[in-house]
Image (tube, grey):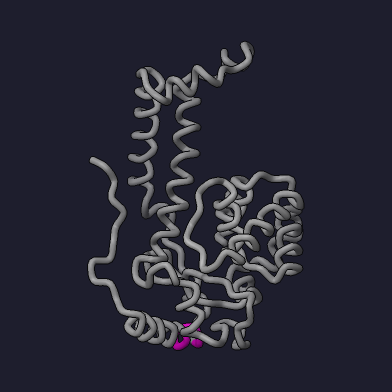
């Protein structure tokens, strides 16, 4: 059965979206005043261990089938042969498993981006920004360096935070001291007054996985950010996204 992305069957008007976001932000303002930790809740990894085990087993078994059957995957393997010494150590089913993992990662990135649009549509950044004028962490007015931060990754919309507030929530200011990639990206991000979301979208766009953009100017800016990040870190776009995923940004 073909996968169908979940859709909201009761879409809201813009006024209803703004009203919902206003209550949402007020809700978190009250909670954060008592415990700032509510802005960064993550489900325990073991909660999904059984599901992930089943997914892993399915990927392995499907990789064996794809490696043995005629079709586009088998043709891709045949068209991209390995050096003899390496071919003896990389079985075809493992090669397919690696390819499937890469495809899965791209699929997850696209589907996760779509979850932000479930309630508020494609203008999530603009609507969230319109609903909040101050950072919930620092209390300072929000400027152009707005980060969309998810307090919980369960479908609820992100909250607009300042870069400073977001870094404080994620505990990242002190965590990059021995991380040259982090140091390079933090410096570049500060220099450009850009967000992690812009970097991610720029990388995805340059990888051929574009997501909706508010304007052509923002597309060009994000692509430029991603290119400079790749140069500064000597990483490709995929590995930059991997780094952000590991950091939770």
Where is the N terminus found, in terms of image quarters? top left
Q: Is residue 13 left or right of residue 176?
A: left
Q: Residue at x 28, y 50 (%)?
A: 4
In magenta, the rendered stretch is 29-33
Q: Is residue 138 left or right of residue 8?
A: right
Spot occupied by residue 45 in the image (x, y as percentages of width and height): 43, 54
Q: In the figure, 64 relative to 103: above or below?
A: above
Q: Residue at x 53, y 46 (%)?
A: 208
Q: Main SS type for the magenta part?
A: helix
Spot occupied by residue 24 in the image (x, y as percentages of width and height): 39, 82
Spot occupied by residue 204 in the image (x, y as percentages of width and height): 55, 51
Spot occupied by residue 90 in the image (x, y as percentages of width and height): 54, 20
Q: In the figure, 152 relative to 100: above or below?
A: below
How many marks do you count on the picture? 0
Where is the C terminus found, in terms of image quarters? bottom right
Farthest residue, direction front? 216
Q: Residue at x 38, y 24 (%)?
A: 66
Q: Nearer the viewer, residue 230 or 24?
A: 230
Q: In the figure, 247 relative to 92: above or below?
A: below
Q: Nearer the viewer, residue 43 or 7?
A: 7
Q: Residue at x 40, y 52 (%)?
A: 46
Instruction: Reply yes or no: does residue 32 show up in magenta.
Output: yes
Instruction: Reply yes or no: does residue 155 show up in magenta.
Output: no
């Amino acid at each position: 059965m073909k996968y169908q992305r979940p859709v909201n069957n009761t879409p809201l008007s813009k006024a209803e979206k703004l009203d919902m976001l206003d209550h949402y932000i007020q809700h978190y303002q009250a909670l954060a005043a008592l415990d700032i930790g509510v802005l960064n809740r993550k489900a325990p990894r073991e909660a999904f261990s059984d599901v992930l085990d089943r997914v892993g087993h399915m990927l392995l078994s499907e990789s064996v089938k794809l490696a043995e059957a005629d079709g586009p995957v088998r043709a891709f393997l045949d068209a991209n042969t390995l050096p003899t010494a390496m071919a003896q150590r990389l079985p075809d089913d493992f090669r397919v498993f690696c390819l499937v993992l890469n495809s899965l990662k791209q699929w997850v990135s696209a589907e996760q981006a779509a979850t932000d649009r479930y309630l508020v549509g494609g203008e999530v950044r603009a609507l969230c920004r319109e609903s909040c004028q101050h950072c919930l962490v620092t209390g300072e007015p929000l400027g152009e360096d707005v980060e969309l931060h998810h307090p919980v990754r369960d479908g609820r919309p992100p909250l607009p935070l300042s870069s400073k507030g977001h870094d404080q929530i994620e505990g990242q200011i002190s965590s990059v001291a021995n991380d040259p990639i982090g140091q390079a990206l933090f410096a570049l991000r500060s220099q450009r007054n850009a967000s992690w979301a812009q970097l991610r979208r720029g990388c995805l766009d340059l990888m051929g996985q574009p997501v909706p953009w508010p304007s052509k100017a923002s597309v060009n800016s994000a692509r430029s950010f991603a290119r400079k990040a790749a140069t500064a870190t000597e990483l490709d776009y995929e590995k930059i996204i991997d780094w952000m995923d590991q950091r939770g940004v």
